[in-house]
């Protein structure tokens, strides 16, 4: 049973806000939600991580509803350089040794001029 | 943030030869490292989990005798693809985690092409 479900692809235009939603219906109490960005032929890059409500950093915001069964990555005013694959991961990160980052299919975001 | 390096960044080898890929944590000690394989247009597939000083744990379907993993120190793990074949051509990515890291630090990846 997949831990996360994301749209396979999304299209947007420069300057727009992009919201990518990830479903994780079976999220456990101790699970955190982490988003990564990956460009072709590069390793994944950490974007943002959260447990509940809203988290914001210099590049993105992460919205997590009260039931935590989904989360939304929000990218403000995207540019062409935001074209990448975005992965949502859930896991019991604080447990340390037992957490194994497992990737789903990810969302391929294409930003058009 | 923490940095993980991989060497080489790309390698081309002939079928039947072996190739070693290094993964290093540059500014922290990584008690656990993970090795992934990624085929074109696909997601990262976990191959094995490597803990310093102990044998790696391989995922189902990954041949441990073909993909040799050694995690001899807290800053270095190696993946050796033995008797490589064209179907082993892929993008290999390692990641590392420190004792108290809440992030997973990924390497830049190694492109392996077997001819």
Image: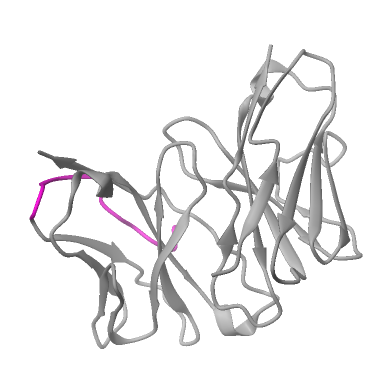
The residue under the point 30% across, 55% down is A6
Side of B114 relative to B64 (left or right): left
Q: Is residue B40 magenta?
A: no
- Residue A34 placement (x, y as % from top left): 42, 70
State the quadrant of the C terminus of chain B.
top right
Residue A1: x %, y % from top left = 46, 58
* Quarter of the rendering containing residue A58: bottom left
Magenta segment includes A13: yes
Identity of the residue drawn at 18% across and 50% down: A79
Q: Is residue A54 left or right of residue A47?
A: left
Q: Main secondary structure of the magenta part?
A: loop
Total labels: the figure holds: 0
What colouring method underlies this structural image? one colour
The residue lying at 66 percent from left, 51 percent from top is B5
Residue A1 showing in the rendered view: no
**Residue A68 vs residue B24, the one in the foreground:** B24
Looking at the image, residue B102 lies above or below residue B2: below
Left or right, A64 with respect to B101, comes to left
| Residue B3 spot, x, y in % from top left | 61, 61
Residue B99 appearing in the image: yes
**What is the span of residues highlighted in magenta in the rendered image?**
A1-15
Rendered-image quadrant of the N terminus of chain B: bottom right
Q: Residue at x 60, y 51 (%)?
A: B107
Residue B43 placement (x, y as % from top left)? 47, 43
């Amino acid at each position: 049973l997949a831990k996360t479900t994301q749209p396979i692809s999304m299209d947007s235009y420069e300057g727009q806000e992009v919201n990518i939603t990830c479903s994780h219906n079976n999220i456990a109490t101790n699970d955190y939600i982490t988003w990564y960005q990956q460009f072709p032929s590069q390793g994944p890059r950490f974007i943002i991580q959260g447990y509940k409500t809203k988290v914001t950093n210099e590049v993105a915001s992460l919205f997590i509803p009260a039931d935590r069964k989904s989360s939304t990555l929000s990218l403000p005013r995207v540019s062409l350089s935001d074209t990448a694959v975005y992965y949502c991961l859930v896991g019991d990160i604080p447990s340390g040794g037992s957490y194994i980052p497992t990737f789903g299919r990810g969302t391929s975001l294409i930003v058009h001029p | 943030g923490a940095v993980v390096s991989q060497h080489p960044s790309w390698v081309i080898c002939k079928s039947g030869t072996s190739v070693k890929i290094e993964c290093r944590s540059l500014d922290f000690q990584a008690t656990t490292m993970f090795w992934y394989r990624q085929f074109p247009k696909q997601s990262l597939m976990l191959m094995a989990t490597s803990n310093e000083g102990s044998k790696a744990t391989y995922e189902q379907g990954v041949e441990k005798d073909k993909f040799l993993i050694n995690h001899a120190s807290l800053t270095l793990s190696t993946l050796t693809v033995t008797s490589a074949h064209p179907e082993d051509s892929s993008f290999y990515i390692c990641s590392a985690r420190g004792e108290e890291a809440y992030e997973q630090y990924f390497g830049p990846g190694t492109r392996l092409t077997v001819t």
